[in-house]
Image: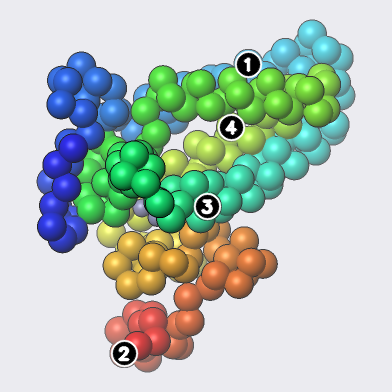
């Protein structure tokens, strides 16, 4: 692990000395997007064709799953990725999971969890939700995983693409504030909804009338 003294913002950090393990920590963004979209489609197909769920029920489960994902996304980012490490091991793990992204936020190959790890986490959620809700898991998890792909798309876009000149620009500013000004605020990436609910919205001035930019309070 090579940790810069202060954030580089450009370039790429190193997680493992072993080149094979190091390679596994990187991914092209298209890999998880395609992978989880296919899995989601299979889950919907299986729910309707094999388990006999009606389309309206599947739609409802799908929307609920996507909504629950946004909560899990917020809680993961706030309490797991930004855990306060008390030991050296925990600090090292925390850095590998998320600290490295704060140091190299524009590293295109580390804007998504490695797909192998993401598949393991998705399997854990499948087992958990199956135990809670039985066969409803197919529609629910399909929405949950599409919530994840939407989150990945937003996160990749805000780091790689220019700020759009439309309503989506709030997402760019929201995540930029988390990265560059107030890392203990603005944990929601796909939307600021849960930041409003849990009181972690950054305090913003109104957009500057000339530049249209939002500037956070000093
Ligand atoms: Zn963060
Ligand atoms: Zn980010």
194 relative to 27 in the view: left or right: right
- Of helix, strand and loop, which one carries label 3? helix
Q: Give me the C-alpha separation between circle 4 and circle 3.
A: 20 Å
Q: Position of residue 121 (x, y in %)?
A: 53, 27
Residue under pointer 1:
42
Residue lying at 14% horizontally and 42% vertically, measured from the top left: 2
Secondary structure of residue under mark 1: helix
Question: Which residue is nearer to you in this view: 200 or 90?
Answer: 90
Q: Is residue 35 above or below residue 7?
A: above
On screen, residue 137 above or below 187? above
User: Label 2 to label 3, Cα distance in Å?
Assistant: 37 Å
- Does the beta carbon of the residue at mark 2 sit less than 8 Å from ligand 2? no
Give the image location of residue 110, x and y in percent.
29, 38
Q: CA distance from mark 2 to mark 4?
A: 40 Å
Ligand 1: which quarter?
A: bottom left
Residue visible at 68% across and 44% down in the picture: 68
Q: Depth-wise, is mark 3 or mark 1 nearer the camera?
A: 3
Judging by the rendered image, the residue that carries numbered circle 3 is 79
The reply to whether dot 1 and dot 4 touch (C-beta < 8 Å) is no
Quadrant in the picture for residue 184? bottom left
Which residue does the numbered mark 4 point to in the structure image? Answer: 145
**Marks 2 and 4: CB-CB under 8 Å?**
no
Q: Residues within 10 Å of mark 4 (few under 14, many from 20)?
A: many
> Is label 2 or label 4 in front?
4
Cβ(mark 4) to ligand 2 < 8 Å?
A: no
Q: Nearer the viewer, mark 1 or mark 4?
A: 4
**Which label sits in the foreground, 4 or 3?**
3
State which tag comes first along the sequence, 1 or 2.
1
Circles 4, 3 touching at the beta carbon (< 8 Å): no
Residue 73 placement, left or right of 71: left
């Amino acid at each position: 692990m090579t940790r810069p003294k202060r954030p580089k913002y450009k370039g790429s950090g190193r997680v493992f000395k072993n080149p094979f393990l190091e390679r596994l920590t990187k991914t092209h963004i298209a890999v998880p997007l395609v992978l989880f979209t296919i899995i989601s489609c299979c889950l919907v197909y299986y729910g309707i064709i094999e388990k006999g769920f009606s389309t309206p029920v599947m739609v409802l489960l799908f929307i609920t799953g996507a909504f629950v994902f946004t909560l899990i996304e917020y809680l993961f980012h706030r309490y797991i990725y930004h855990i306060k490490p008390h030991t050296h091991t925990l600090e090292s793990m925390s850095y590998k999971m998320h600290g490295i992204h704060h140091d190299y936020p524009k590293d295109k190959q580390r804007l998504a969890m490695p797909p192998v790890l993401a598949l393991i986490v998705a399997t854990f959620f499948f087992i958990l939700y199956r135990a809670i809700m039985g066969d409803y898991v197919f529609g629910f998890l399909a929405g949950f995983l599409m919530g994840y792909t939407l989150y990945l798309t937003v996160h990749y876009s805000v780091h790689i693409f220019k700020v759009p000149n439309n309503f989506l620009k709030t997402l760019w500013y929201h995540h930029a504030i988390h990265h560059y000004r107030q890392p203990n605020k603005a944990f929601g990436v796909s939307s600021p909804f849960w930041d409003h609910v849990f009181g972690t919205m950054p305090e913003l001035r109104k957009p500057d009338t000339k530049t249209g930019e939002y500037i956070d309070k000093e």
